[in-house]
Amino acid sequence: MGNPAPGQPSQQDWILGDTDAIIQLLACDKLSLLKVLRSQYGILTVIPEPVEIELRNLVKNRRFQDVHQRLTKAFNNGLLTILQEAALSPLVGVNTHEAFERIERLGEKFRRLGVGSGEAYAHAAGIELSLPVLSNDGKAINVLMAY
Amino acid sequence: MANGATLPGPFLRTFDVLVFGRQIAVLDDNDCDKARQELTKRNEGITSCFVGRSFADGLQNFNPRLIDGAAPIIGATHPMHPYDSRRLIVCAK
């Protein structure tokens, strides 16, 4: 495993965020706790692209319209980072493309089991990268463990 | 994978993050209870021990999965759920 760039947390210090938990932290205006995790503990919150899409869609709905600006700010200031192939190298070495493809394939497989798109890819990345997942959906975990 | 996927966890919940904030004294009980009330008001699903109870009351039955290893532990001391044993213990840098 390579070393992270100076000042950057290592990949081991990532949490993979799922839509339901992130939207709740936005809704109760406590996303700042993720900032504390990043600044004081070096833990970055990373979200797969399907989670980003779900979040951006959710804040268009009336129910979460009021947190639209909070979400935009979180993306703009890097509090929520999108999982990208190039960022995987410290954890998986040079085989970032293969690792990212495995996440994509597993995420799609999970999604076809009826698990929501965001949680499917968050858990797929959690498996591939051995990272904690921030997700309230215990049902999805049970489905994935039981299939 | 006939026996299901091996999900490594830990599986953190919204309330793990809130309780973590309370553990490291970034939030107090009142802050956390306001968050609980806001989620309830929005009909969001919340961890069962906090349903219909104040944050302080619910905390007694909540075994945190995100923990600052150097701060005093709060919440239930024993696992209340099968996944509670998978914890993320962190230290400030």
Image (cartoon, helix red, strand yellow):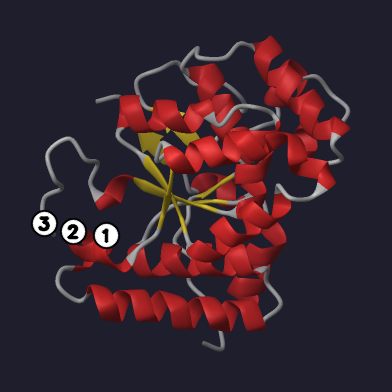
User: Label 3: chain?
Assistant: A
**Comes first in the chain, label 1 or label 3:** 3
Residue at x-position 74% and y-position 34%? A66
Residue A109 picture location, percent across and down: 56, 83
Vertical arrangement, residue B22 with respect to residue A144, above or below = above
Q: Verify CB contact (< 8 Å) between mark 1 and mark 2.
A: yes
Residue A76 picture location, percent across and down: 44, 40
Looking at the image, can residue A98 be seen? yes
User: Label 2: chain?
Assistant: A
In the image, A70 versus B2, the foreground residue is A70
Q: Which residue is mark 1?
A: A87
Residue at x-position 23% and y-position 47%? A10
Q: Verify CB contact (< 8 Å) between mark 2 and mark 3.
A: yes
In the image, A74 versus B49, the foreground residue is A74
SS type, badge 1: helix
Query: Is the residue marked by circle 2 packed among few (<14), some (14-19), or many (20+) residues within 10 Å?
Result: some
Quarter that holds the N terminus of chain A: bottom left
What label does residue A19 carry, if any? none
Q: Which residue is mark 3?
A: A2
